[in-house]
Image (cartoon, rainbow, N blue to C red):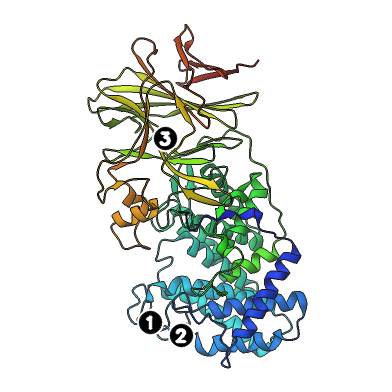
């Protein structure tokens, strides 16, 4: 079984002008064959996200005409544009729409579902999308629209903007991608309005960004992020927000969009494994966007000097949205238009500067969460996610069923690189059920193909072991295959793979053909698509887990746990000794010194390659 939405690294998709011309040629042929006598370019199989879709295809046809001057396109553009103006512009309030601040305003909006009152909650983002598609039509059809029609289209765009910002609550779904999209629509529209009117729209768009989006950012892993559906980041919508920030900077030149995009891009870079795998988010844990992310990932990969294009997106949507029948859908067409217009090239080499919430070298990645506990470890082509024991999730030492990974005080981090080795030391104060404060030191060292994780803690009582993750997926070409085992691992103590003893709604057995997202949604408080899968996953009581017993040769008064991922040639040879400077860890590949805290309380880490 494969994850359905992480299908390939996005920078593998050709993005040269010839490739994009081929994409537009395919869209053109599909659109011309679909165009109805009324002028509709909607996918016949679509039932929702429909109010802007025909207009999206119109904008792509306008771009195709701009690039090729295909004589078949002017009539199709005009017919389809008039269809939207005639059939898809609504000015009467949608029955049941809950977010109006001005009733019976008469301002135009686009519907998420066409039938009155059928599902009005999506009208706000549908109108944002319609505004963006409309502005792209204006900009790609220069010479096709007469003055009267162009004026009508610009006025409609202004009406959409006013409905979004005057007649309804701004950003009612707490979805930053939609809100930043609205700001982009205002910035683009402003360029086509009379100067005074356009400047009012532009300034209003910038204030909305500052006051309603930027001021409401949520911190995760040290980064202030535009929130998505109530959470700090969603790995479907987060990269879409990054694309909107890229377009906002391209259109306005305002440095605030570049700065916030850089922050979000660095955060994404720290989350992503080298393979492009990622997991977690408040709306979709594993459903990744495709072409909608390319603009932002490509634009900011160049700005921050990181290989963001390794993001494993949904390549079934590699070029444009696809309807239920597999046909071209106009939803998100504006992203394809901008992607084609932008000439930024991918930055394809990883950042080498140490990053607090990631350790990455070669094919090994450790991504850390906000508590500096690993969220994903990738080595040997397999990704492990946090396991659960007694409803506690993470990586770390367990004593009598209590997981010691939640910090009770400041977490300290030290990075060190030497030769072909990269290391990170995480020092974390924790409290167990006995209320005793213990200091856990976790050392992660990689040579680019293997990862050593060594954890040192004051000697624990009772049954104790190190929880070292749940095997979850393995890279299989451009796909991620579900797995239930991780054969490439060795340890100083007893190593075992455990599974839940009995099936229950709050246990997760990796041997079942069930994804983390499916299990999480089943435990979420709201229906699938609206619930928070991360919150649902937190209700999981126990999972498949790799467990490592303590080393039998630890210094007196200490427990030492050591495991090596990525190679299974016998046990790990880790020797831990006390010295005047601190603890010395020796392996066949390196020697590490874990020194006491300095005058500022920071841990000291030195590393020496055994081959030197």
- Quarter of image, res 8: bottom right
Q: Is residue 337 left or right of residue 289?
A: right
Q: Position of residue 608 (x, y in %)?
A: 59, 17
- Above or below, 422 against 7 in this view is above
Instruction: In this rendered view, identify the residue nearer to me: 438 or 324.
Output: 324
- Above or below, 562 against 216 in this view is above
Q: Is residue 587 left or right of residue 116?
A: right
Residue lying farthest left? 434
- Tag 1, which secondary structure? loop
Q: Which residue is mark 1?
A: 94
- Label 2 environment density (alpha carbons within 10 Å; few <14, some 14–19, many ≥20): some
* Alpha carbon distance from label 2 to label 1: 8 Å
* Alpha carbon distance from label 3 to label 1: 47 Å
- Tag 2, which secondary structure? loop
Q: Quadrant of the C terminus?
A: top right
Q: Which residue is mark 3?
A: 373
**Disc 2 + disc 1, Cβ < 8 Å:** yes
Q: Position of residue 576 (x, y in %)?
A: 45, 13
Mark carried by residue 443:
none
Residue lying farthest top? 580
Q: Position of residue 133 (x, y in %)?
A: 58, 75
- Tag 3, which secondary structure? loop
Q: Quadrant of the N terminus?
A: bottom left
Instruction: In this rendered view, identify the residue nearer to me: 488 or 42.
Output: 488
Q: Which residue is mark 2?
A: 90
Q: Is residue 357 left or right of residue 25?
A: left
Q: Earlier in the sequence, mark 3 or mark 1?
A: 1
Which residue is painted at 70% across and 86% down in the image?
Answer: 74
For discs 3 and 1, the disc positioned in front in the rendered view? 3
């Amino acid at each position: 079984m494969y994850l359905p939405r992480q299908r390939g690294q996005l920078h593998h998709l050709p993005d040269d002008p010839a490739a994009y011309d081929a994409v537009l040629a395919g869209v053109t042929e599909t659109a011309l064959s679909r165009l109805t006598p009324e002028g509709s370019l909607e996918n016949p199989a679509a039932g929702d996200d429909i109010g802007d879709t025909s207009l999206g295809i119109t904008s792509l046809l306008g771009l195709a005409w701009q690039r090729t001057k295909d004589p078949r396109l002017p009539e199709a553009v005009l017919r389809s544009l008039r269809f939207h103006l005639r059939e898809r512009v609504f000015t009467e309030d949608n029955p049941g729409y809950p977010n109006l601040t001005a009733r019976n305003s008469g301002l135009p909006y686009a519907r998420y579902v066409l039938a009155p009152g059928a599902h009005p909650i999506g009208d706000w983002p549908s109108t944002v999308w319609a505004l963006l598609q409309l502005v792209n039509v204006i900009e790609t059809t220069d010479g096709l629209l007469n003055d009267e029609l162009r004026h009508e289209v610009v006025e409609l765009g202004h009406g959409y903007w006013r409905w979004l910002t005057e007649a309804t609550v701004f950003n009612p779904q707490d979805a930053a991608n939609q809100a930043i999209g609205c700001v982009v629509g205002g910035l683009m529209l402003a360029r086509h309005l009379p100067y005074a009117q356009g400047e009012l729209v532009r300034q209003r768009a910038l204030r909305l960004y500052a006051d309603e989006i930027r001021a409401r950012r949520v911190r995760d892993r040290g980064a202030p992020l535009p929130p998505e559906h109530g959470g700090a980041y969603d790995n479907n919508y987060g990269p879409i927000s990054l694309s909107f920030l890229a377009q906002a900077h391209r259109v306005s030149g305002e440095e605030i969009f570049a700065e916030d995009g850089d922050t979000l891009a660095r955060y994404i870079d720290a989350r992503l494994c080298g393979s492009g795998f990622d997991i977690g988010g408040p709306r979709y844990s594993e459903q990744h966007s495709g072409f909608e992310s390319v603009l932002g990932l490509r634009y900011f990969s160049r700005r921050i000097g990181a290989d963001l294009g390794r993001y494993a997106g949904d390549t079934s949507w590699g070029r444009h949205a696809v309807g239920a029948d597999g046909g071209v859908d106009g939803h998100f067409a504006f992203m394809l238009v901008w992607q084609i217009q932008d000439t930024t090239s991918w930055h394809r080499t990883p950042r080498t500067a140490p990053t607090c919430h990631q350790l990455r070298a070669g094919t090994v990645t450790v991504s850390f969460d906000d508590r500096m506990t690993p969220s994903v470890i990738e080595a040997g082509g397999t990704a492990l996610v946090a396991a659960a024991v007694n409803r506690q999730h993470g990586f770390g030492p367990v004593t009598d069923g209590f997981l010691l990974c939640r910090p009770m005080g400041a977490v300290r981090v030290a990075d060190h690189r030497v030769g072909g080795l990269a290391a990170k030391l995480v020092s974390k104060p924790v409290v167990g059920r006995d209320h005793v404060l213990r200091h856990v030191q976790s050392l992660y060292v990689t040579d680019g193909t293997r990862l050593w994780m060594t954890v040192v803690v004051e000697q624990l009582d009772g049954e104790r072991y190190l929880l070292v993750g749940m095997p979850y997926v393995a890279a299989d070409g451009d796909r991620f295959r579900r797995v239930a085992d991780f054969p490439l691992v060795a340890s100083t103590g007893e190593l075992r793979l455990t599974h839940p003893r009995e099936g229950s709604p709050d246990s997760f057995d990796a041997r079942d053909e069930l994804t983390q997202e499916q299990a999480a949604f089943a435990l979420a408080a709201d229906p699938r698509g609206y619930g928070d899968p991360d919150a649902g996953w937190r209700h999981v009581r126990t999972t498949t887990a790799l467990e490592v017993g303590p080393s039998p040769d630890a210094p007196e008064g200490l427990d030492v746990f050591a495991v090596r991922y990525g190679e299974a040639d016998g046990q790990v040879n880790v020797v831990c000794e006390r010295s005047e400077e601190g603890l010395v860890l020796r392996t066949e590949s390196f020697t590490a010194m874990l020194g006491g805290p300095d005058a500022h309380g920071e841990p000291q880490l030195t590393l020496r390659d055994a081959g030197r």
